[in-house]
Amino acid sequence: MSELWNPKKVLITGAAGTIGSVLREGLKGKYETLALSDIKPLGEAAPGEEIFENADIRDLDATAATMEGVDCVVHLAGIPVEDEWEKILPMNLIGCYNVFEAARRAGVKRVVFASSNHAVGYYRRAGVIDTDVQPRPDSRYGVSKVYGEALGRLYADKHGMAVSCLRIGSFQPKPQDLRQLMTWISHSDTVHLIERCIDHPDYHFVAVYGVSNNTRNKWDNSKVDWLGYRPRDNAEDYAVELYAKEDTEHPIAKPFHGGMFCPMEFSGDLNKID
């Protein structure tokens, strides 16, 4: 890929979801064609949109049918929270493989993968973590995101695909609790981050934290500053409002970046998690 990179057709999987719906609106008119796929209804196609309803990423052939002429895939589809392995496996592992493999077969040049902060959730909040830290998932969901990042690295190295993995924080209209003073990412900053991953002229593989310009941010993107992600919003604007609420965070959630996923089914020893 080079300075000639000029994507014409971008596909969003999971386009009916929470992030997908915001991204659909945020990218409207930016590219010649915005292709949208989901197993849920997507409504009428606006000018410049192409709709794929009942597009199940668990089905490789159905996924392949969405890839024709696509330059870049933004892969958002999947189970978005911790759940039973029987649900995580087909959507977040098999489905993720199907997206990468269908993209490869179709000659798609770039995939933007929605990873999660839960891929590194068992690091302690007392320290800042950068984009080079080893995986430390806090849940089955977090494991599925580690898998997606590893799959992205494979397709970058083996097949020459440009891949970005977004360790998305707390995607909300505004921060909801004290933890999100660190982890919040606004709607507009999310669109900006994904735009940079779609439009940047040349990269091989990159992992980047999806977080706004929060005063209390503990996720360091300095090693990927070249990407041009410049978040503007700051969770600190809501600090007074949040401190007025009762702090109900679980005591096992409180030490860790991953928050509420950390105490789920927890039976370990906190003293051994350095």
Image: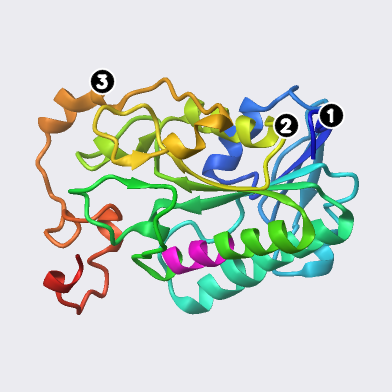
99, above or below 235, in the image: below
Residue at image mark 1:
4
Residue at image mark 2:
201
Instruction: Name the residue: 15% across, 58% down.
Output: 250
Q: Position of residue 190 (x, y in %)?
A: 51, 33
Side of 123 relative to 239 (left or right):
right
Mark 1–mark 3 Cα distance, whole angstroms, equals 40 Å
Please, what is the three-letter code of the amino acid marked with disc 2?
A: Pro
Residue 23 position by quadrant: top right
Mark 2–mark 1 Cα distance, whole angstroms, equals 7 Å
Q: Of helix, strand and loop, which mostly describes the magenta segment?
A: helix
Residue 135 position by quadrant: bottom left
Residue at image mark 3:
237
Instruction: Tell me if residue 56 can be seen.
Output: no
Instruction: Name the residue: 90% across, 44% down.
Output: 69
Q: Position of residue 120 (x, y in %)?
A: 37, 58
* Secondary structure under the numbered disc 2 in the rendered image: loop
Q: Nearer the viewer, mark 3 or mark 2?
A: 2
Label 3: how many residues lie within 10 Å, few (<14), some (14-19) or many (20+)?
some
| Magenta span of residues | 142-148
137, above or below 237, in the image: below
